[in-house]
């Protein structure tokens, strides 16, 4: 029994069930479980297996066809005794004999010229004598061969309206003695309609319409009986123009898709076709053209569906179909084809063959963009055209948005066909210090002069958009201009983040996030659909909005009335007007101040104003959001993981002498060597002093900071103050911080550093002077005869003059020192630190840092424009060093005339600087110099 159970169970599970696919399913096991539960019921019995015999299926021999067709009259055709059709025989007959155009009535794909050449070659079908009914039946079922020369005339009505052509010809014959009737090919209006539909469907070889040199023309001898030849030709020439547009668009679709099965007709733009075919053989069409062709293909699919529906109506003969009604029915499509053909000619056909893909794609997108704005300016009459162009633009722009999405999300600029306006320079790796400036190139294409220009990004503006001049206003994809900088910043930031060892980008969750994330193009489409639906508001919403406006008006009226009563004005009408005006202004600001503006003319139309606002509200926010996310992650990574702020502070500590105690130990060692007349221009000595000074307080920077001497033109060292020229600090900044603190920035830091050293040297020289040096030397000279000193001026008076000159020089140097260190470096540094914290992206941080260096460079009078002011200051500092040297030398080492000369030189320089600075402050051109001018004026003595 157990064996039977196992065998039957296995057989049941492997057998199919009705309405169930497969074996051993849940339904099989459920039925088996039910049987087991039933076996435990009180009515169970002992089971014994009985053999089962499978019944064979009986074949149904009933003649259903005869039964169903009983009593019906069957039309078996003109040949009832014809044997049954055999497919083998038909294939043999087809291989042996071809049907002629006259016999079949089916159009053969040959030109009319070929018809004339092969008329003699057509196979004539012979008919059996005594079967006139069969021939008559066949002639009723086929079309009269109107495409052959001397085709038989078809029967038509003798009514006057049906013979207008004959009436008109008779009139011309009677009135014009030189009129000569020409041979004509008569066709019916139905045949004209069919060839019109075939032409618009893309059929190239027709009888009425002919292709010559890429143009569609109308045969001169085609006429209908109820229209004059001029009238028919006028109508058909318009149809031929539409057919030519369809032919050019269809040919472009075939070229891009690679389905062009037959060669181009001779003379149809042979140069461009050969060049385009060579381009197609060498490389596939780029994605922007593919997207544009896909949009055209979808439109023509719907257009051909309409043509097919018209053909069904003609075949059905339920209603009269005329050429006029067909053209009226297709009027909307024909106007749209005109729009598409115009866009194609401007955006594709007129572009030279050797033009790069980036120019082709940009030009096509700009053409569509401008066409939308142009057609919308007409108003509501062109709503259908604007809607068509907008749908075409949305499809065509898809590759661009996919490239942008891949770049700003994954940091990879995938553009194999080089059609995007931003292209990657693969010669510069990501970990190079010039990555931020030289990695990407913005292609700017001038449509007015039809030339290509490449604008490389500069250090101060890597987006490239800010550097375009007035002659480059039409030089890039129009719709990306407002967010071009954000796209570049987000793309470069994401690529940099992918190559940094940071925690902001976790690769473990990237695959799951990519699966859940919607692409930029999908978000754009969803936003557009949401925006277009906003115009469909229910009446209840409108009523509730009106009630809310009324309540707000009543409330505002009471408030305005109370304010007017305070001024003794009791005028309810004036209060209402004020309240209404206030609410209108408030409503205006709420609608138009924000980025989410709704100005839809209808839920289906996209106007010029709406199109730009659609981009602003449906596309730009998604790019802006990704820009903020990418750049924010990069800034946090640089500040947190790579100590960006710490390196910026180190540059100010050492180059701008903010670490005063550390740098004081370094430069005083140099100044002491100078005072002792010892050589200090030795790299070993300089680096040892620098390492000892830095290592005590900032040991982490001792390996990064070094100093070296640059070779200086010997002709420049004419004054003692120029002995410090060539002294250069160097700070090793790691990647990627060197993107911000570049070698060019360190050159500016060194220029300020040299100026500060010169001021510090002059100040140190004056501060270290001792009065004892003068008094001791004076006592020595008092004991001996000295006619020179006694004759001109007593020694005590000379000492007094030296002390006064020292005080004046110290006032000047201290005023300059305080101005540079506090008014310029300290205050500008505080402003710079605040701006660094507010920077949103790396490019903005680079510009902030560069602007900070430019500011301190200008305010330290290092700009070439104010070089005369710096020369006067350097002259005073040089005078300080000469004065200090003579002070330490004592009396006897210099003459009394040198004091007069130093006083005179200092007075002249002092007067010059005070005059220049006061004029600059009064003009307002250099407001930061006001404190220095006031301080120098306080120490200036009037003569």
Image (tube, rainbow, N blue to C red):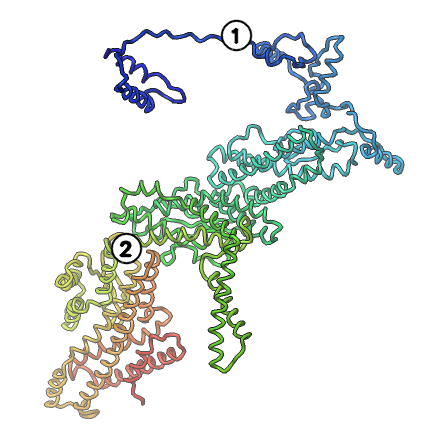
How many numbered tags mark residues here? 2
Task: Residue 87 in the image: state x and y as whole percent.
Answer: 57, 11
Rendered image quadrant of residue 812: bottom left
Mark 1 nearby-residue class (10 Å; few <14, some 14–19, many ≥20) = few
Q: Residue at x 38, y 22 (%)?
A: 21
- For the C terminus, the quadrant is bottom left
In the rendered view, tell whether residue 814 sits above or below residue 842. Answer: below
Task: Residue 231 in the image: state x and y as whole percent.
Answer: 76, 38
Q: Is residue 35 visible?
A: yes
Earlier sequence position, callout 1 versus callout 2: 1
Q: Residue at x 59, y 42 (%)?
A: 341
Left or right: where does residue 935 sit relative to residue 178?
left
Task: Residue 225 in the image: state x and y as whole percent.
Answer: 79, 32
Task: Residue 803 in the image: state x and y as whole percent.
Answer: 19, 85
Left or right: where does residue 566 sit relative to residue 855?
right
Mark 2 nearby-residue class (10 Å; few <14, some 14–19, many ≥20) = some
Q: Is residue 478 visible?
A: no
Left or right: where does residue 480 sit relative to residue 683?
right
Question: Which residue, as the protein is rendered here, is positioned at the far front?
Answer: 42
Q: Residue at x 51, y 47 (%)?
A: 363
Which of 398/595 is in front?
595
Q: Which residue is mark 1?
A: 61
Which of 14/794 is in front?
14
Q: CA distance from mark 1 to mark 2?
A: 86 Å
Which secondary structure lies at badge 2?
helix
Which of 460/553 is in front?
553
Q: Which residue is mark 2?
A: 636
Which of 50/428 is in front?
50
Are the residues at dot 1 and dot 2 in contact (C-beta closer than 8 Å)? no
- For the N terminus, the quadrant is top left
């Amino acid at each position: 029994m157990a064996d039977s159970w196992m065998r039957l169970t296995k057989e049941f599970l492997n057998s199919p069930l009705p309405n169930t696919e497969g074996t051993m399913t849940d339904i099989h096991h459920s039925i088996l479980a039910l049987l087991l539960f039933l076996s435990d019921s009180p009515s169970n019995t002992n089971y014994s297996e009985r053999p089962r015999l499978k019944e064979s299926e009986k074949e149904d021999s009933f003649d259903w066809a005869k039964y169903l067709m009983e009593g019906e009259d069957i039309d078996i055709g003109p040949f009832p005794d014809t044997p049954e059709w055999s497919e083998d025989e038909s294939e043999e007959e087809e291989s042996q004999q071809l049907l002629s155009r006259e016999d079949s009535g089916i159009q053969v794909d040959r030109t009319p010229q070929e018809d004339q050449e092969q008329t003699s070659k057509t196979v004539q079908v012979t008919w059996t004598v005594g079967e006139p009914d069969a021939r008559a039946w066949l002639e009723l079922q086929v079309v009269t061969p109107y495409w052959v020369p001397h085709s038989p005339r078809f029967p038509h009505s003798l009514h006057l309206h049906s013979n207008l052509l004959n009436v008109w010809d008779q009139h011309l014959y009677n009135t014009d003695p030189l009129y000569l009737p020409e041979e004509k090919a008569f066709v019916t209006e139905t045949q004209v309609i069919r060839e019109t539909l075939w032409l618009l469907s893309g059929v190239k070889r027709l009888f009425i319409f002919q292709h010559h040199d890429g143009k569609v023309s109308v045969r001169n001898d085609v006429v209908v009986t109820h229209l004059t030849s001029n009238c028919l030709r006028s109508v058909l020439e318009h149809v031929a123009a539409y057919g030519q547009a369809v032919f050019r668009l269809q040919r472009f679709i075939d070229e891009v898709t690679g389905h062009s099965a037959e060669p181009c007709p001779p003379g149809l733009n042979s140069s461009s076709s050969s060049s385009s075919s060579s381009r197609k053989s060498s490389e596939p069409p780029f994605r922007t053209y593919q997207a544009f062709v896909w949009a055209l293909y979808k439109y023509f699919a719907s257009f051909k569906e309409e043509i097919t529906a018209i053909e069904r109506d003609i075949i059905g003969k339920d209603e009269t179909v005329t050429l006029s009604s067909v053209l009226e029915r297709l009027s909307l499509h024909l106007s749209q084809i005109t729009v598409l053909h115009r866009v194609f000619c401007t955006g594709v056909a007129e572009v030279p063959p050797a033009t790069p893909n980036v120019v082709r794609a940009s030009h096509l997108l700009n053409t569509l963009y401008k066409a939308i704005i142009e057609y919308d300016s007409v108003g509501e009459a062109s709503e259908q055209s604007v809607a068509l162009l907008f749908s075409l633009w949305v499809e065509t722009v898809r590759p661009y948005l996919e490239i942008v999405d891949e770049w700003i999300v994954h940091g990879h600029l995938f553009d194999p066909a080089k059609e995007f306006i931003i292209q990657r320079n693969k010669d510069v790796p990501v970990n190079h210090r010039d990555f931020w400036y030289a990695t990407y190139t913005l292609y700017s294409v001038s449509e007015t002069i039809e030339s290509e220009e490449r604008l490389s990004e500069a250090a101060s503006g890597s987006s490239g958009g800010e550097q375009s001049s007035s002659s480059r206003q039409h030089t890039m994809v129009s719709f990306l201009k407002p967010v071009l900088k954000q796209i570049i910043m987000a793309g470069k930031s994401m690529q940099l983040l992918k190559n940094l060892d940071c925690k902001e980008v976790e690769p473990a969750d990237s695959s799951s996030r990519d699966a859940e994330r919607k692409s930029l193009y999908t978000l754009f489409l969803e936003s557009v659909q949401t925006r277009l639906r906003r115009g469909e508001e229910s009446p209840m919403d409108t009523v509730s909005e009106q009630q809310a406006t009324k309540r707000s008006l009543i409330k505002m009226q009471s408030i305005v009335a109370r304010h007017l009563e305070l001024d003794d004005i009791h005028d309810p009408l004036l209060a209402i007007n004020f309240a209404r005006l206030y609410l209108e202004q408030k409503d205006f600001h709420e609608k138009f101040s924000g980025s989410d503006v709704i100005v839809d003319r209808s839920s289906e139309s996209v106007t010029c104003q709406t199109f730009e606002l659609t981009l602003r509200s449906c596309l730009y926010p998604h790019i802006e959001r990704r820009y903020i996310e990418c750049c924010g992650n990069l800034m946090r990574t640089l500040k947190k993981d790579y100590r960006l702020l710490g390196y910026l502070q180190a540059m100010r500590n050492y180059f701008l002498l903010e670490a005063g105690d550390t740098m004081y130990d370094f430069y005083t060692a140099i100044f002491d060597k100078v005072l002792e007349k010892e050589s200090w221009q030795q790299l070993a000595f300089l680096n040892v002093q620098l390492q000892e000074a830095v290592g005590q307080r900032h040991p982490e920077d001792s390996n990064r900071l070094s100093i070296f001497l640059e070779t200086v033109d010997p002709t420049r060292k004419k004054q003692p103050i120029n002995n410090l020229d060539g002294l250069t600090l160097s700070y090793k900044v790691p990647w990627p911080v060197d993107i911000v603190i570049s070698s060019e920035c360190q050159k500016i830091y060194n220029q300020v550093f040299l100026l500060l050293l010169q001021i510090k040297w002059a100040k140190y020289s004056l501060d270290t002077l001792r009065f004892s040096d003068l008094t001791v030397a004076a006592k020595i000279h008092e004991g001996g005869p000295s006619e020179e000193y006694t004759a001109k001026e007593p020694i005590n008076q000379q000492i007094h003059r030296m002390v006064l000159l020292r005080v004046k020089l110290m006032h000047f140097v201290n005023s300059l020192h305080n101005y540079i260190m506090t008014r310029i470096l300290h205050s500008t540094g505080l402003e710079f630190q605040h701006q660094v914290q507010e920077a949103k992206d790396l490019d903005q941080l680079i510009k902030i840092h560069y602007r900070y260096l430019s500011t301190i460079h200008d305010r330290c009078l290092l700009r070439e424009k104010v070089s005369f002011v710096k020369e006067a200051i350097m002259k005073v500092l040089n005078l300080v060093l000469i004065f200090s040297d003579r002070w330490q030398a004592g009396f006897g080492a210099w003459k009394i005339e040198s004091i007069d000369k130093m006083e005179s030189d200092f007075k002249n320089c002092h007067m010059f600087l005070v005059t220049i600075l006061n004029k600059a402050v009064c003009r307002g051109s250099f407001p930061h110099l006001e404190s220095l001018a006031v301080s120098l004026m306080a120490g200036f003595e009037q003569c």
